[in-house]
Image: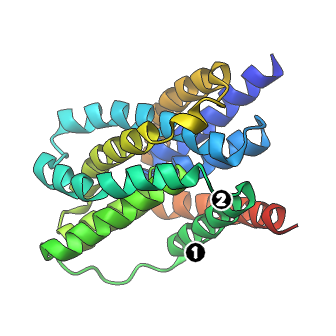
Amino acid sequence: MSTLLLALGAGALTGLALGALGGGGSVLAVPALIYLLGFTPAAAGAASLVVVTVTSATALVAHAREGTVRWRAGALFAAAGAGPAAVGGLVSRHLPGALLTGAFAVLAAAAALRMLRPAGPRASPAPGRPSRVAGAGAGLGAVTGVLGVGGGFLAVPSLVNVVGLRMRAAVGTSLLVITINSLTALAARTGSAADVDWSAVGPFAGAAVLGAWDGRRLAARLSAGTLQRLFAYALLAVAAFMLADAVR
């Protein structure tokens, strides 16, 4: 029963972050699966991809109804990342747990610091060169494959600054990219998936989907800046804890 309650609570928080911020939920999912539910880093990455796929696909349906998904741009961006995501998923099975934990901690800290950085004046987005789009898509796919994160906090700025989408369209399109990359990486993690406790992942994913709806309501009540700062400080604390655990 305690495992079920932990899975429900952690899943709800993950979904809340995803719904409120449009990304970043998987950055909380991996440490929650490791430290609260006792998953190994490799198994946590595989389980996180399941949670990310379910929540992103669910949110994608809602954004598609609102017309904020740019299907062609998203499919091309995801296609560039499909190969690296698959390779990353295979590579992750052979990496030491401490290395995966440390790399994840560094990525989480970088994401938090980026959220805390003051936003400068935005220029009008312009379509990027195909080589830049392919490079950004490949980089995101590799991160998804190796670390088991959807990468919404990386996909959204890439779709704005590299592809040239407006912010609202970038958020909706990022869900398509995340869903495709996560499915590809998950398919390559068959060995890690065998160690996953699916009885815990099911409630976790279900609570995340419900939490995402509450997150969207929370976003309507609090400013985006306040939400980002709260999430960033929590992320820094998680990153520091994971990094200390990886090096000891």
Residue type at the position of mark 2: Leu
- Per the image, the residue denoted by label 2 is 100
Q: What residue appears at the point 19 percent right and 32 percent down from the top-left corner?
A: 65
Of residues 131 and 157, which is closer to you in this image? 131
Instruction: Answer whether labels 1 and 2 touch (C-beta < 8 Å).
Output: no
- Is 142 above or below relative to 133? above
Where residue 247 sits, quadrant-wise, is bottom right
- Is 242 above or below relative to 18? below
Q: Quadrant of the C terminus?
A: bottom right
Residue 7 seen in render: yes
- How many marks can you see? 2
Where residue 141 sits, quadrant-wise, is bottom left
Judged left or right of residue 191, residue 34 is right
Q: Position of residue 37 (x, y in %)?
A: 76, 34
Does dot 1 land on a helix, a strand or a loop? helix
Q: Determine the CA span between mark 1 and mark 2.
A: 20 Å
- Per the image, the residue denoted by label 1 is 113
Mark 2, Cα crowd under 10 Å, few <14 / some 14-19 / many 20+, is: some
Give the residue furthest to the top. Answer: 1
- Is 2 above or below relative to 13? above
Q: Position of residue 180 (x, y in %)?
A: 31, 43
Image coloring type: rainbow
Q: Position of residue 61 (x, y in %)?
A: 27, 31
Judged left or right of residue 57, residue 100 is right
